[in-house]
Image (cartoon, rainbow, N blue to C red):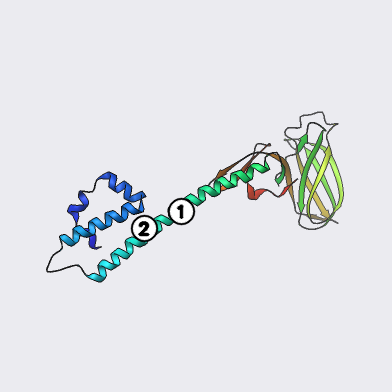
Amino acid sequence: MILSATNAVTTTTDASTKANAASDPSAAQDRFLKLLVAQLNNQDPMNPLDNAQMTSQIAQINTVTGIQQLNQTMQSMASQFNSLQVMQGTALVGRSVLTEGSSMAVAVADKTGKGGFELGSAATNVKIEVTTAGGQVVDTIDLGAKAAGRHTFDWDASKYTGSTDALQFRVTAVNGSTKLDSTPLSLSKVTAAGAEDGQLVLSLSNGKTINYSQIKALV
């Protein structure tokens, strides 16, 4: 690179100028022009700079400057987008959402447990088993035949005398004698919204933190 010959000039550039050049495109361009003028003043008369090479160097610094300005613009846009995401996410606070999981949500007011599931294909019979955290079955719900897709269910928890804080459920779906794949869906309320690594994240009442893309449905 032709500017590397001017060692005397580069050594006189102080630390603050270097820092500014790294963060400010106009400072970087100004520094380049100063180095170029110094090199022209100190060039060997018997071996002058090639015009095409000097033009290429100027084009390169203009390209670098343009990229730096574009990066600054994109960073500013990303920051504004994150703020907009958080503002939109606050509209979900207080709403109930379905996400993958098998924890049972039980409303204290009416003693009703709620959950959901997804079926890849139609089932002739679906059974929900409500369990403790240790896996003990405390009740069973027969839902009968269900079509493929997403479903929700309710469970009467008024007769259950144990703690409802850690209740789970599991889904068994069959088509005739063939067991079907199913995905349990946990119901929970959104308690807070924020941004993390450019993604909208939501805090749920069950203690989990999820990305917005993990929401299966609003209930």
User: Which kind of residue does numbered mark 2 sit on?
Assistant: Thr
N-terminal-most mark, 2 or 1: 2
Structural crowding at the residue carrying mark 1, measured as other residues with C-alpha within 10 Å and reported as few (<14), some (14–19) or many (≥20): few
Question: Is the residue 131 above or below the residue 149 in the image?
Answer: above
Q: Residue drawn 48% across and 50% down?
A: 76
Please tell me whether mark 1 sits on a helix, a strand or a loop: helix
* Residue under label 2: 65
Quadrant placement of the C terminus: top right
Q: Is residue 128 visible?
A: yes
Question: Is the residue 42 above or below the residue 211 in the image?
Answer: below
Q: Residue drawn 32% across and 47% down?
A: 20
Quarter of the view holding residue 156: top right
Q: Residue drawn 29% across and 44% down?
A: 16
Left or right placement of residue 165 versus residue 141 in this view: left
Q: Is residue 198 visible?
A: no
Q: Please, which residue is most extreme toward the left here?
A: 46
Quarter of the view holding residue 50: bottom left
| Residue 3 in picture, x, y percent from top left | 23, 60
Q: Nearer the viewer, residue 24 or 181?
A: 24
Please tell me whether mark 2 sits on a helix, a strand or a loop: helix
Left or right placement of residue 15 versus residue 66 in this view: left
Left or right placement of residue 149 versus residue 10 in this view: right
Picture disc at residue 198: none
Q: Nearer the viewer, residue 180 or 54?
A: 54
* Residue under label 1: 73
Structural crowding at the residue carrying mark 2, measured as other residues with C-alpha within 10 Å and reported as few (<14), some (14–19) or many (≥20): some
Q: Nearer the viewer, residue 71 or 198?
A: 71
Quarter of the view holding residue 4: bottom left
